[in-house]
Amino acid sequence: MDPRAGAVIASVQLWRGGSTLDLVDVPVPRPAVGEVLVEVRLATVCGSDLHTVLGRRPSPAPSVLGHEAVGTILELGDGPVRYGDGSPAEVGDRIVWGVTVPCGHCDRCLDGRTAKCRTLRKVGHEPFDGDWALSGCYASHVLLPAGATLVRVPDEVPDEVAAPAACATATVAAAVEQAGPMLGREVVVSGAGMLGLVAVAMAAEAGAAGIVVLDPDAGRRATAAAFGATVTGDPRRTTLGEVDVAFELSGAADAVEQLAAALTIGGRLVLAGSVSPGRPVAVDPEQVVRRWATVTGVHNYEPRHLAQAVDFLARTSQLRPWGSLVADPVPLDDLRALLAERVGGPVRTAVRP
């Protein structure tokens, strides 16, 4: 046992590969300098974890999965632990935390791309037999290393709304930054899952003239209207006009091609949904050149985007039905059922350890 181990015992769902999960108890080390021990209040199930369990993306096994969560600070290690605004973190604070933990000093970190740090560590993506066993959120406790991004959650943002901020909402905040101004512009959002609905709501807040949402699922298209969509359609039967700003959040190769072909002069296409292997796409480089078009990608996000995400959720907590997107949480024991392939149903499922 780690000589720093304290009296806290964590209950974790240990993923061993495939669909194998074991609920085990693990002694929790006392937090070292700069570390934060968090008691998980609620964790939502991101699609990337479904892809991991179904074998569509690699991840170390055994490990504790889960990277969208909200929790309460239980214990702080020695030394100052601060939020991005410089205020001190305190025991009892309700927080969300960033997916990535960078080194802070490599060339990429110094260039402002900490999400692509050369020695990056990620919440819910680390081997259980490595030096960060309690990295995942499908557990009663998470031990966050020094340098992790922490954001305090305002009282008006409930747990089920706060948890997805750690991945979906913050990722879209980064995508919106790459998209540039949307005031008075025509915006298309491909994919009406959690990322797509956040993008719709952010585009509406930014003053987009029109927001078209494309998704083959009629139920999700209907949901998009409550988040600010002005037009919805099935991508298989929709012809687009000229598009100023497009977000591709479904990961579908056909959608990438459709949106790239629709960009107007100076149009921008932001890709954030293509996070698992797929077929190559056909993009006409002549049209990209002649239209001064931009096609860019976003993967993960920077610390400022997580803070922006939480602020956005607080501002729109009464305007948009965020809570309706998350199913009632189940106990940690029932996680296996949530990690099976789903067709339809809620945008996010959840566990409450």
Image (cartoon, rainbow, N blue to C red):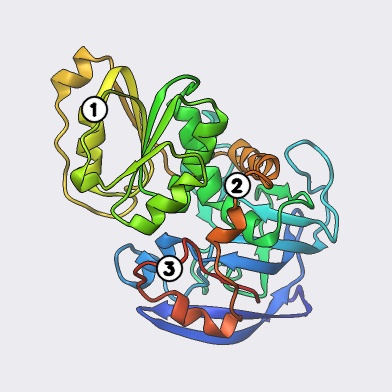
Tell me the CA gap for discs 2 and 3: 19 Å
Name the foreground residue: 273 vs 84.
273
Instruction: Classify the position of the C terminus by image quarter.
Output: bottom right
Mark number, residue 345: 3
Q: Is residue 151 left or right of residue 285?
A: right
The three-letter code of the residue at mark 2 reads Arg
Residue ID at (30%, 49%)? 251
Residue ID at (69%, 52%)? 146
Name the foreground residue: 173 vs 55.
173
Q: Is residue 204 left or right of residue 151?
A: left
Q: Earlier in the sequence, mark 2 or mark 1?
A: 1
Residue that label 1 marks: 262
Regarding residue 323, the answer to whether it shows in the image is yes
Residue that label 2 marks: 320
The three-letter code of the residue at mark 1 reads Ala
Percent x, y of residue 308 = 63, 37
